[in-house]
Image: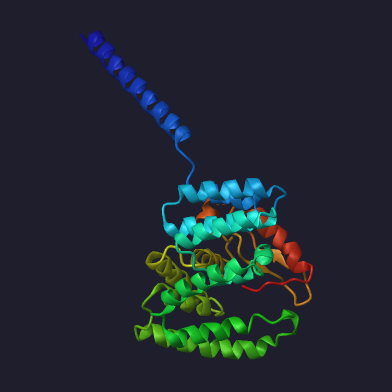
Amino acid sequence: MRLQRHLQRQKIVTLLTAAALVLAGATVEAAAEAPPTYDNLFQQASAAYGGSDPARCVELFKTAANAAVRDGQAARSYFAAAACATAGGDKDAAFALLGRAAEKGYRDVDRATGNPKLEPLRQDPRWKGFLDGVKARDAARQAKDNAELTRICDEDQKDRQAEDPGKVDWSVVAKRDAERLKRTKEIAAQGGLKVADDYFRAALVLQHSPETADYEQAHLWCLKAVELDPDLPDARWLAAATEDRYRMSQGKPQLYGTQFKKDKEDGPWYLWQVDPSITDDERAKWDVPPLASAKAHVEELNGGKPQPH
């Protein structure tokens, strides 16, 4: 009887093991057949953005747009595809793609006015119609924003947009930063943060604080901004950057690779140490470029083109 029970137990174990293997195989097969996510596709397209094959770049961004789960994602992809089409010399295709971006609600004025790849389109009569639509959608979004916080944030950014950052008197800026920081905290304490833009702007001001706790709060406000508006321009990137800044201030490796540092005023810039477990796929979820781009940016910084965050 003991032998029989032993054999029965062995049979059950064997059957369970076989079932587990079948399930594991099915899981692996399903994973292999699962279509790429929007984030994966957008990252692939972004890698081709500065390449020598504009037509491939266009198709990759269009594929990403088709995989988008939100209109904001599709709008951003079509806009990027239009930039690639412009680089390839096909203005008609570019405007058709901008039209699709507009249909999906494209509203990023800064990228629309600042993307150098689109310069060949800006003298075309069709450009004004597209840009006017972008501005109107952006204005509608900002209609409910806290006006005082908007002014504070604009002043914060203006202090950091000098043509020659090397000539900025940072001791003077630091005093203005302290005043802006104090007032931003007062606005937040009074319940003045209502919409996604408010949380984003407050975070942008707070991350210029010298205090570790403020970086943590800025990160939390960014996450709130993303929660309220998943497609708010730059909010995801700033969420990653504030997390990186928070960790760097404690001497810990950053996660995403957004933070750069130099130890002496006249010393070279370097990328703060990065946690090797974080993948480029994870960076893509937060609108952070691949790590290779961050490493290349160090060369730009040391080449006399500093871009303070």
- Quadrant where the N terminus is found in the figure: top left
Q: Is residue 277 visible?
A: no
User: Does residue 252 appear to the left or right of 171 in the view shown?
Assistant: left
Residue drawn at the location 35% of the way across and 86% of the way down: 190
Residue 64, percent from left and from top: 52, 49
User: Does residue 158 appear to the left or right of 142 in the view shown?
Assistant: right
Q: Between residues 1 and 305, which one lies in front from this camera angle?
A: 305
Say how the picture is coloured. rainbow
Residue 92, percent from left and from top: 61, 56
User: Does residue 51 appear to the left or right of 67 in the view shown?
Assistant: right
Q: How many marks?
A: 0
Residue 237, percent from left and from top: 53, 64
Residue drawn at the location 74% of the way across and 80% of the way down: 164
Residue drawn at the location 72% of the way across and 58% of the way down: 296
Residue drawn at the location 42% of the way across and 75% of the way down: 140
Point out the residue furthest to the left here. 1
The quadrant in which residue 186 appears is: bottom left
Q: Is residue 36 visible?
A: yes
Q: Between residues 231 and 31, which one lies in front from this camera angle?
A: 231
Residue 51, percent from left and from top: 70, 51
- Quadrant where the C terminus is found in the figure: bottom right
The quadrant in which residue 119 appears is: bottom right
